[in-house]
Amino acid sequence: MSTSLSVYAVDFAKLQHAFGCKDVDLLRAIQDENADQLEEDERRFDEEKAEGEPELRAVLSELVQGELLHFEADYEHQYHFAIVMLVEHFGALIEMVEGGGPSGGTARMIDPLLVKHGFPPGFSSLQLFEGGPPQPYPKFSQPAVGHLGPAEIRIILSGLKPIDIMGADKAAAAWMLRIISWMRVAATEDKGLVLVWS
């Protein structure tokens, strides 16, 4: 199965507020936007439901209600799908990267290159690629979600140094330029980034 990485510019304030907001109209709007996926999930349940596994519609409701009644490792995928629905509701897709993110070797070379160009010392691209959804949403292991908030993006872009990739690893340099371009797109509307693996 192929892997893809979807990058969204997201209104973080609205996304974070949605958790536990108990807004029936919001829940109905997201259900309407994802009617086909929710119906497909219900059909799957009729055929192959695992014991105790919650339906996606119920999990989406849990997030809006702020009550994680079924959150455990075996059902993380359902929370992943529900959070993606919220991300898509409050955000816009910037890019879908077929094949996923950087390889392990390339990933280790990205952070020093980012710091060289003005990112804060100790910055970890792992937070962006796999650090979990923004608080207060639960963090889960697979499929991965990562994020970078609008305040962090503003600080990083304000201290960005002129790009100099002479002698740098080509793959790492390409990913650095990609990350910076995502941040610039998000910053135009003071949004954050959410990265979703699938």
Image: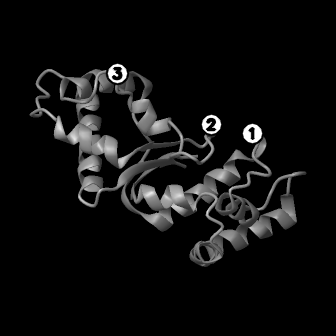
Q: Nearer the viewer, mark 3 or mark 1?
A: 3
Where does residue 50 sit, x and y in percent of width and height? 86, 52
Would you call the spot at circle 2 few (<14 residues within 10 Å), some (14-19), or many (20 or more)?
Answer: few
Q: Which residue is mark 2?
A: 141
**Amino acid at pointer 1:** Ala
**3 left or right of 96 in image:** right
Foreground pick, 106 / 57: 57
**165 left or right of 5 in image:** left
Give the image quarter of residue 72. top right
Q: CA distance from mark 1 to mark 2?
A: 8 Å
Foreground pick, 176 / 91: 91
Q: Which residue is mark 3?
A: 122
- Evaluate if marks 1 and 2 touch, with contact meaning CB atoms under 8 Å apart: yes
Q: Secondary structure at mark 3?
A: loop
Q: Residue at x 18, y 29 (%)?
A: 117
**Amino acid at pointer 3:** Gly
Q: Which residue is mark 1?
A: 73
Foreground pick, 65 / 78: 65
**134 is higher (above) or lower (below) than 44:** above
Q: Is residue 97 visible?
A: no
Q: CA distance from mark 2 to mark 3?
A: 22 Å
Q: Is residue 114 visible?
A: yes
Where does residue 123 sit, x and y in percent of width and height? 34, 27
Q: Residue at x 35, y 26 (%)?
A: 106
**Amino acid at pointer 2:** Ser
Tell me which numbered mark, 3 or 1, is placed earlier along the sequence: 1
Q: Residue furthest right?
A: 51
Q: CA distance from mark 3 to mark 1?
A: 30 Å
Tell me which numbered mark, 2 or 3, is placed earlier along the sequence: 3
Count of numbered marks: 3
**65 is higher (above) or lower (below) than 132:** below
